Image (cartoon, grey):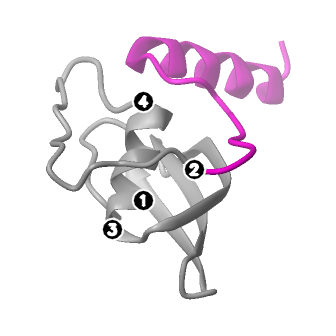
Amino acid sequence: MGWILKCRWLLAVAALAVGAPLAARVVGPAPLVEPAQTLVVSQRAGVSLAQATQLALRMFPGRVVRAETVARGGRSEHQIRILGDDGRVRNVRVDALTGQIL
């Protein structure tokens, strides 16, 4: 098996282990999130892409343009691009295991 196939296989296994898809796209308007909601993170399961998107929208209200999970530096992270209500585009990175904004 070539090294590229091994890397893809390892990424797929790692994503399944933390319960996160390798890549997902959010299309359409972003869901409304109540500011009083809290993000509960299980250290074993990690943070889903949907949870990371909600967390990013709490920090930067707007519309999600793109959201995906990628491997970076041996860890999975969620990358969320938001078109803010103020017209600015923000790229928010969230650690897929801990939920910490990077």
Residue 33, compared with residue 20, is above or below; it is below
Q: Nearer the viewer, residue 81 or 28?
A: 28
Q: CA distance from mark 4 to mark 2?
A: 16 Å
**Residue 76: x percent and y percent?**
47, 39
Quick one: label 3 or label 2, which is nearer the N terminus?
A: 2
Q: CA distance from mark 1 to mark 2?
A: 8 Å
Amino acid at the residue labelled 1: Leu
**Would you name the residue on which mark 3 appears?**
59
Element marked by disc 4: loop
Amino acid at the residue labelled 3: Met
Residue 39, compared with residue 8, is above or below; it is below
Q: Nearer the viewer, residue 48 or 30?
A: 30
**Would you name the residue on which mark 4 appears?**
48
Are there few (<14), some (14-19), or many (20+) residues within 10 Å of tag 2? some
**Would you name the residue on which mark 2 appears?**
30
Q: Residue at x 41, y 71 (%)?
A: 60
Q: Residue at x 78, y 27 (%)?
A: 3
**Would you name the residue on which mark 1 appears?**
57
Q: CA distance from mark 1 to mark 3?
A: 5 Å
Quick one: label 1 or label 2, which is nearer the N terminus?
A: 2
Q: Which mark lies nearer to you, 4 or 1? A: 1
Q: Which mark lies nearer to you, 1 or 2? A: 2
Callout 1–callout 2 Cβ contact below 8 Å: yes
Element marked by disc 3: helix
Residue 17, compared with residue 96, is above or below; it is above
Hey, which quadrant is residue 59 in on the image?
Answer: bottom left
**What span is colored magenta in the figure?**
1-29
